[in-house]
Amino acid sequence: MTSLLQTVHPWLGYIMVAALLVAAAVAFNRAKYAREYRPGVFVLVMVAVDVQVLLGLLIYGLTSSWESRPEIAYLHPLVGLVALGAGHAALRRARNEQMAVDANRAAGRGMLATLVLILIAIGIASAPAFL
């Protein structure tokens, strides 16, 4: 089972990058044309990020990853959790905005912040040992 999870987790990470990029483009497009803020697509993407982080934590526990290289044991999961928090915080902020343009921009910024943090996490996991 762990080998399946270890295969799915990296691929889902790459899919997350594409989904976050599309979600950010949708958000900024809606803001540009002052369209109504509808959180559906953003919530769907963040649920996928939730699943990705949950899979990562499951792999972390099942494979005793805390005994791995320090960047895999500590940095990769920490950056993943920060990405998750940043995305959810941005969606909460977007929901609290009064104007649709501001709400869409907040959602777009959150999707971009989550995207950058996930790319950093992928880079940490993919890089050769440096610590």
Image (cartoon, rainbow, N blue to C red):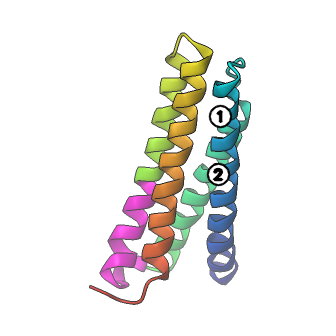
Of residues 116 and 74, the one drawn nearer to the viewer in this rendering: 116
Residue pictured at 42% horizontal, 78% vertical: 65
In percent of width and height, residue 8 lies at 69, 73
Q: Residue furthest top?
A: 98
Image: magenta residue range:
65-81
86 or 74: nearer the eye?
86
Quadrant of the rendered structure where residue 39 is?
top right
Q: Is residue 76 magenta?
A: yes
N-term-proximal mark, 2 vs 1: 2
Callout 2 secondary element = helix
Query: Which residue is identified by label 2?
Result: 21
Query: From the image, which quarter does the N terminus lie in?
Result: bottom right
Q: Residue at x 34, y 77 (%)?
A: 71
The amino acid at mark 1 is Ala
**In what element is the residue under mark 1?**
helix
Residue 27, numbered label: 1
Residue 57, given in percent of the width and then of the height, sits at 50, 64
Q: Main secondary structure of the magenta part?
A: helix
